[in-house]
């Protein structure tokens, strides 16, 4: 049998009939430290090329790396949050390879002595059940430089005449989190992969150790996948799909690789152990280089760095800094706020949990906070194709302003439609809700005599409609209310107008 | 020490991106074999009960605070590069044409 990299696929149902998927997920997270893992260079995203480099991260002769204390603390906190054991003593190791993204010709990583190992993460699935993902290890390492490939088509490495390297990213602290092989997921494998990465992202965000922006590459996922013929216990050969950079892609990549492996195995072929590249646009993977064996990396303990041996006191002190686990917090907030399951899911999916939390904390009612954030603000953010927090930051709308807006309604100064106009003004940069309401002269008319006069006029001018109401057709009053509101230029309480009209026309 | 094969040397040369001619490969198998054999004499040392050592000093936890220090100016960083372009290190083609 010859090895094959054919891209034929079979249907997902066919895969499930004949095979069980085994999946391993490796997630790389760039820590949000101010400086790199082994030197004091800044880590700011988007800086000019090669402006955040020094002899240490350029691997110049004689440079001596020193470990970033904050990075080690973050690694331990991540390990603890993943229910891992924390090593009593561990070392860094050199992973040797020849590729220009690391000027040292090795990446400083950890090999057989990770800082954290043997943990798990409980992952909530859409149907309300929980799946436990076993964590094998979380280890410390450094990111690599960024290459631009010149002379080929569309920046591909194939066909390039040469490459240009920016080492700003080389040396940024990374934590690599590796799951154990996940078996028995069956048809839910793609969903579980996605839910795990989402849960991990939420956890890392709650720990405040990384900005976890998949689209900027500060969190990246590699998907290892193999198939076992049903009824056997023999692990198949796996492929490793690199840099799958969105939650949706994680799910799609698992599914695609299952269908691709299935086609190879069905045809009597053999899966090649190799790196695959994920293509977001076409939803397929293509073959990359064949994977080196660990032997080829010639790992050995890093002689320039001394071992890391966190004391148990340090570990316990860091355990004390862990936040409430995100899944538990969501359940608590849902019950505090009295949201239905569906409402809560919408809030989470729309990325509004934190904004609503802050707004409630600032004094709004949960229902009010949800209404304003998921209404006009979310609509505008959607139209602008950005997430709500980004939109809010760009348009200076804050939780405090939503509180102010709500209080303008509850105090009786504005009705709902006026409040919407005020919100539009705030989003257009006209100032705080009160400023906008003042500037636009928005104020419910409190003087009942003006409203009563308007009601009388409208009844007189619409005698036929008024007669219908007198005859018991109460819904006809709607037309009169509309006329009154028009006469009042919208600045009246429609409820009160209705009361007055009915009081005058019905016994 | 198991004998070093010609395939082993060719594989290592590939990883190290060193082109070796057939004649060089043949020579290297012999020369590297002698070197490995010489180094292998350390394996005769009595090491029972001796912990492997990776650092000469018994110290742990040497760290620095997460405080930014000045980096090199880009032109200084690039000064030693044989070639640069767009303020980046220019490196030769990474993949050979298939």
Image (tube, coloured by chain):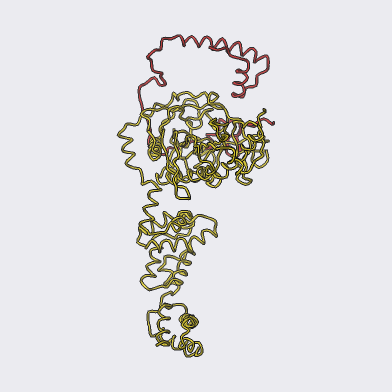
Chain colours: A yellow, B red
- x and y percentages locating residue A355 in the rendered image: 42, 56
Q: Report whether A279 appears left or right of A367.
A: right
Most distant residue in the left direction: A313
**Camera-nearest residue between A269 and A103:** A269
Q: Nearer the viewer, residue B39 or A47?
A: B39
Quadrant holding the N terminus of chain A: top right
Number of numbered markers: 0
Residue B61 seen in render: no
Q: Residue furthest right?
A: B98
Placement of A463 over or under A388, stated as above or below: below
Q: Position of residue A407 (x, y in %)?
A: 37, 67
Above or below, A107 relative to A398: above
Relative image position of residue A457 (x, y in whole percent): 46, 88
Question: Which quarter of the figure has residue B28?
Answer: top right
Q: Identify the image quadrant of residue A79.
A: top left
Q: Which residue: 41% across, 75% down?
A: A443
Image x and y of residue A404, in percent: 38, 65
Question: Taking the image as drawn, is residue A485 in sight?
Answer: yes
**The C terminus of chain A - image quarter:** bottom left
């Amino acid at each position: 049998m010859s090895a094959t990299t054919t891209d034929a696929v079979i249907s997902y149902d066919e895969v499930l009939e004949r095979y069980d998927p085994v999946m391993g997920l490796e997630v790389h997270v760039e820590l949000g430290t101010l400086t790199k893992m082994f030197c004091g260079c800044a880590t700011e995203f988007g800086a000019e090329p090669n402006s955040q480099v020094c002899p240490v991260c350029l691997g110049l002769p004689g440079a001596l790396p020193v470990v970033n204390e904050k990075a080690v603390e973050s690694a331990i906190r991540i390990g603890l949050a993943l229910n891992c054991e924390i090593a009593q003593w561990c070392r860094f190791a050199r992973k040797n390879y020849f590729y220009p993204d690391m000027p040292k010709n090795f990446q400083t990583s950890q090999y057989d002595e990770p800082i954290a190992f043997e943990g798990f993460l409980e992952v909530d699935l859409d149907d309300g059940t929980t799946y436990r993902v076993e964590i094998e290890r979380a280890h410390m390492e450094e990111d690599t430089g960024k290459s631009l490939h010149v002379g080929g088509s569309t920046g591909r490495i194939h066909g390039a005449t040469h490459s240009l390297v920016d080492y700003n990213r080389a040396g940024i602290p990374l934590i690599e989190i590796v799951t154990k092989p996940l078996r028995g997921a069956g048809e839910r494998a793609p969903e579980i992969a996605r839910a795990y990465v989402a849960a991990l992202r939420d956890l890392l965000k709650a720990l405040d150790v990384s900005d976890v922006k998949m689209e900027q590459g500060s969190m990246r996922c590699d998907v290892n996948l193999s198939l076992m013929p049903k009824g056997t216990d023999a692990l198949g050969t796996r492929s490793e799909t690199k840099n799958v950079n969105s939650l949706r892609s994680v799910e799609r990549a698992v599914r695609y690789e299952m269908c691709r492996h299935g086609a190879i195995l069905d045809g009597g072929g053999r899966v090649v152990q190799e790196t695959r590249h994920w293509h977001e646009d076409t939803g397929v993977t293509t073959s990359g280089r064949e994977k080196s064996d660990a032997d080829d990396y010639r790992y050995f303990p890093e002689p320039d760095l001394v071992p890391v041996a966190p004391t148990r006191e340090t570990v316990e002190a860091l355990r004390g800094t862990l936040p409430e686990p995100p899944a538990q917090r969501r359940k608590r907030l849902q019950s505090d706020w009295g949201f239905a399951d569906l409402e809560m899911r919408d809030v989470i999916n729309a990325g509004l949990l934190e904004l609503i939390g802050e707004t409630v904390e600032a004094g709004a009612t949960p229902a009010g906070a949800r209404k304003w954030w998921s209404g006009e603000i979310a609509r505008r953010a959607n139209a602008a194709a950005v997430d709500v927090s980004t939109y809010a930051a760009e348009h200076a709308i804050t939780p405090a302003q939503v509180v102010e807006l709500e209080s303008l309604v509850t105090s009786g100064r504005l009705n709902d439609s006026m409040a919407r106009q005020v919100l539009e003004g705030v989003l257009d940069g006209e100032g705080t809700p009160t400023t906008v309401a003042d500037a636009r002269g928005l104020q419910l008319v409190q003087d009942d005599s003006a409203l009563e006069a308007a009601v009388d006029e409208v009844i007189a001018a619409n005698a036929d409609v008024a007669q219908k109401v007198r005859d018991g057709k109460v819904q006809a009053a709607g037309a009169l209310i509309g006329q009154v509101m028009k006469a009042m230029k919208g600045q009246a309480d429609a409820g009160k107008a209705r009361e007055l009209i009915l009081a005058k026309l019905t016994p | 020490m198991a004998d070093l094969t010609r395939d082993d040397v060719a594989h290592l040369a590939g990883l190290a991106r060193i082109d070796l001619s057939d004649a060089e490969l043949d020579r290297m198998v012999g020369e590297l074999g002698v070197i490995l054999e010489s180094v292998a004499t350390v394996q005769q040392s009595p090491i029972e009960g001796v912990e492997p050592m990776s650092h000469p000093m018994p110290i742990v936890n040497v760290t620095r605070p997460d405080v930014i220090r000045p980096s090199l100016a880009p032109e200084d960083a690039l000064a030693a590069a044989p070639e640069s372009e767009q303020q980046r290190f220019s490196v030769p083609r990474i993949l050979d044409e298939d």
